Every structure is written in structure tokens, then in C-alpha cells.
Amino acid sequence: MSKKVAVIGGGLGALGGAIRLACMGFDVQLFEKNEKLGGKTNEVVSGSYRFDTGPSLLTMDFVIDELFDFAGFKRSEMLEFVPVDPICRYFFPDGSIMDASADREKMIDEISKLSPEDADSYDEFISYCKDIYDLTADVFLYTPIHEMDKVLKKGNLSTLFKLYKMDPFRSVHQGVSRYFSDPRLIQLFDRYATYSGSDPFKAPATLNIICYVEYGLGGYYVKGGIYRLVEALINMAEELGVEIYTSTKVDEIIVENDFVSGVFADGERFDVDYVLCGADAVVTYNTLIKGYPVLKDKMNSLEPSLSGIVFLWGINKQNPELKHHNIIFSKDYQEEFRQIFDKCETPDDPTIYVSITSKADPEHASSGGENWFVLLNMPYITDDQDWSLEIDRMRKKVLTKLTKTGIDISNNIEFEKVYTPLDFLNLYNSNKGSIYGISSNSRMMAFKRHANRSRQIKGLYFAGGSVHPGGGIPLVLLSGKMAAELIGEDME
């Protein structure tokens, strides 16, 4: 008789884990509280406008290909990955503009135009980032690091004795500043700390691995929108026999004598042998598991990551000044993060990210128009914030800043939908409205993320951005892979 697994949540980590478990012969039931699967990787369609609401750039595409291969599907027959070039257009406060590219020659040429004295430093910087990747990827990205037997089996013990080579004792900013003198380039590469929801002035320089992932391995767009990936995973899961319940909220993970025995979902008990929890780990211990106060306190002591305000704007005009991905930087990056993390307040001068998928798929907007996904870094939720007021304040700041950049859309917005940290909390049960789980604003945060297997509760496993190895499309899929493999080994 097949062992039963309840998968909580329909995000990418949970979906990927469910697919693997079904392939491994488990009887899998997946519960999602919302009407649609995908978690933060979702979409909004209104009239002639279509928007991705979460991740907008795909890296480490080989992680997805491996999942499809494992499940017996050909990714190329289901999804088209399109290289993005330039990866991003950057607008700096002094009026200068730079197009960043994964093409080395193009990137060096762009740096030469911006800061000739720094052009020769790019290869050295990327080599430094690659060294971190080569040293850490196997043990920190592809191995459940809390399973010491696996670390030892893979021969990675020597890596743990080379922690200093991962540059964990400097901040991201300090690491970048060793290679570049121009503050604009430093700000550009500092930005990658936000991919983990962190402060580049606090997060360890180990996170400079992200620069190599993007510039060394490349960035991609999923033709039709990132949500096409979610749809492909759903199709695979259903074909493999995963039983999917949408609009079904899990109220409790049933634990008896330190063993998982089932879940309560919408008042009904489902008896299972294992639980793969894709929900935020902090929220899970606060709301889904009774008892275990020490674990609960430990999880609550972790600093949440960045949150954000998202504006989805249907624009009835073309803006050729913008590319698929765009960043309009703040004047004082350190002050922006000081306000967000140290003061837990909205920044006075927010950096603006704009993604426009209609640049690649014109049918995502009305004729002659564009679909804008606008993201501002924001603090996680505290008691003294009024997000209804902040929406209006931030909208004005964005429009004013865009106008100063030479882009005036103040009279061209014909559709708007807004997400605040409260929406991330209510829609996705994110801890305090955070987007990326917990921050990496400490030197050893890689070891503090929750493990993929609970040590205290037998049969409980975790996937998603709040656990090892972290947030972002490839990493959450890897978390699902690790959790599924651990469940498989537990059954043997």
C-alpha cells in the first residue's frame, strides 16, 4: 500500500516536491488555500492586460529541466525559455543609464561607457563570484546542509573548513567595493542582496554568488509569462496522479507523540504518513502546529526579509526608454535599507523596479500599451504602519521619480491593482508580510534557515523560500527536491 503525503501549499517548492513524490510512488494530496496554485508566482488578467505577480526573471534553468526529466516530461515541449538581453536597464540618480548583460563583451563595453577605470575589474569580480559558486553550490545549494551525513558523503567536509573563502565576514557591499570604485557600479551589484530579501550593507558577501548566477549562467524569460511554469507543473502533477485541493485551507498539522499523523483541512481529517509543508516555516510553527514552544520562539526570533509594495499598471502608451527589466535607483542606497530594516519604515526615496513582459509578449497589453509590474522594497509588517496611506504616498513618489527620469505616465494608467505587505500576509501567509522568508542579514544565516526535515517531529518536511536553500524559483524547486528525497529515504 502506498504511503500517503499531504503537501501544504501550492507554491513552486510544494508543487515540485509533490511531482517528485508522485514519481516515487507516494499517494500525494496537495492542499492550497487560494483558488489558484503558484503561491507568490501568480498572475492577474484584466481585460487586455496580463501580469506576472511574483518572480520575473528565471535563472539556473537547468534546475527546471532536471525536474521535468525526472518526471518523464520534456520541458522544451511545454515551455520556451528566452534569454533576456539586456538583463536589466539601470537608471542612476545622476541621469546616467546602463544596460547590464550576461554577454561579457557587452557588459564590459557598458561599464567602460559608465566608468572606464572600472572596466578591467569586471572579469576579476565575476571570477571572484564564480569562485564562491564553485566552492559553495554543491554543499549549500544542492545538499540539505542540516543532514551532516549527506555533507560528509558528498565529500564536502573540506568546504566547511574553507568558510573564509566564501567571503562570509565582509558584507555584500564591502565585497563589491573591493573591485569597483564607481558608486554607481557598486550600487548595481549591491542590489543582488535583495534577491534574498536582504540588506547589502549587512548580508554576507557570500551572496555575491548571485551575481555569477545571473551574469555567468544567464537570465531567462518564460515565453507567455512566468506563470506558464506554474501551469506546466500543475499539468505534470495532475498527470502523475497528485490529488489537488484548491480553496482548501489546512488548519492544523496533527502531531501525536512527536509523529505526524495527518492534517485537518477545512474541518476534515486526512490521515497521512508524511507532511511536506510549503507554507512559511515561521507561520507554520505559530499557527499549524500545537505545542513545541521552544521551536516557535526560535523561529520568531529570526528577522523577516524585505517586503514590498507592488503596483500593476496597465499603461496606454509605449515607453521605448524602458526595457523588459528596469531599475531606477535611489540616491542613498544605505539610507534606504536603514529605513527599511533598522527603522521598519517606508523609505523616503525608494528604488523602483519595473518589469514589462509586453516587451517580449505584446499581447500582454492593449494595442499600443504596456503592462507594468512595479516593485518597491518595503519593511515587513509592524504595529505602527498604515499601508492605505503608504499606497498613495508611494504612488506619488514613483510617478514623480519617473517624470524626473524623463518618463511621464501620470495620465496613462488605465488599470491598477496594488499589493502591500498586508496582502502578502493575507494571500500567502508570509511571516509579517515578508516576500523572501527570512533575511540573510547575518554572517551565518545560511545555517539558520529551517531544515528541510524536522528533527523534533518525525514525518514533517519543509520546502519553500523560508527554508534551506532559500528564495527564488530555482532554490525553492531545489528545496522541494531535497524534501522529497528525504521522505523517500525515510520510507526505505
Image: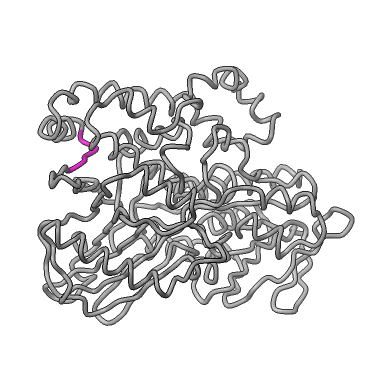
Q: Is residue 70 magenta?
A: no
* x and y, in percent, of residue 295 in the image: 75, 50
34 shown above or below 461: below
179 shown above or below 309: above
Q: Nearer the viewer, residue 7 or 370?
A: 370
Residue furthest to the bottom: 47
Q: What residue is drawn where x is 62% and y is 76%?
A: 248
Q: Quadrant of residue 98?
A: top left
* x and y, in percent, of residue 57 in the image: 33, 51
Q: Is residue 100 magenta?
A: yes
Q: Magenta part mainly helix, strand or loop?
A: loop
Is 380 placed left or right of 257 in the picture? Answer: left
Q: Nearer the viewer, residue 266 or 109?
A: 109
Q: Quadrant of the N terminus?
A: bottom right
In this picture, which residue range is highlighted in magenta?
99-103
Is 266 placed left or right of 186 in the picture? Answer: right
